[in-house]
Image (cartoon, rainbow, N blue to C red):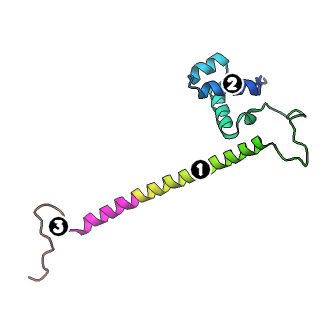
Amino acid sequence: MSKVYRVFSQEFKVAAVRRMLAGENVCALARELKVLRKDLYVWRTRFKSGGAEALRGRGRPAKAAAVMPGVAPAPARSRGRELGAARDKIAELERKIGQQQVDLDFFRAALRHIGEATRPGAGPGATASMRSSKR
């Protein structure tokens, strides 16, 4: 049994994403448009990374929209790619910062633990130094 796939136009997707970004309830929007919530989130992610051009329909683009050999791509398209690459780089750097923070927290706790273990007179009423080993 084969599945029937609905194909949505770029305009439909852009309108749905704009409503979603305006703050509409995603569940209600999905029910109203009869689409999966997952699809709305995928469309939003693509829209944020590449603009409306990233939401084009399935298949081969129309001849008028196709890029001719030897002609530079449209500036909006290249800006979308640059923006997506920049966002990927930012996400990677934020992951690295998070990992470094975890490492710093670990080493701070380890140093605190070692420092408490080596000080014999840390508690109240304790002597400041250790007893002499001579009897």
Left or right of residue 126, residue 2 in this image: right
The spot of residue 95 in percent (x, y) is: 54, 51
* Identity, as a three-letter code, of the amino acid under mark 3: Gly
Question: Who's the residue at 35% across and 62% down the image?
Answer: 110
Note whether 108 is above or below 6 in the view shown. below
Residue 27 rendering spot, x and y as whole percentages: 57, 22
Q: Percent x, y for residue 64? A: 89, 34
Position of the N terminus by quadrant: top right
Badge 3, how many Cα within 10 Å: few under 14, some, many 20+?
few
- Magenta span has 108? yes
Residue closer to the observer: 89 or 128: 89
Give the amino acid type for the residue marked by disc 1 in the picture: Ile
Sequence order check, earlier mark of 2 and 3: 2
Residue at disc 2, secondary structure? helix
Residue ID for mark 3? 121
Disc 2/disc 1 C-alpha distance (Å): 28 Å
Q: Which mark is residue 27?
A: none
Q: Is residue 93 left or right of residue 57?
A: left
Q: Nearer the viewer, residue 47 or 125?
A: 47
Q: Mark 2 highlights which residue? A: 15
Task: State the predominant SS element of the stretch in magenta.
Answer: helix
Q: Position of residue 113 (x, y in %)?
A: 30, 62
Task: Name above or below for residue 129 compared with residue 7.
Answer: below
Q: Quadrant of residue 29?
A: top right
Q: Which residues are magenta?
A: 106-119
Give how far apart the Cα atoms at labels 3 and 1 are: 48 Å
Mark 1 — residue? 90
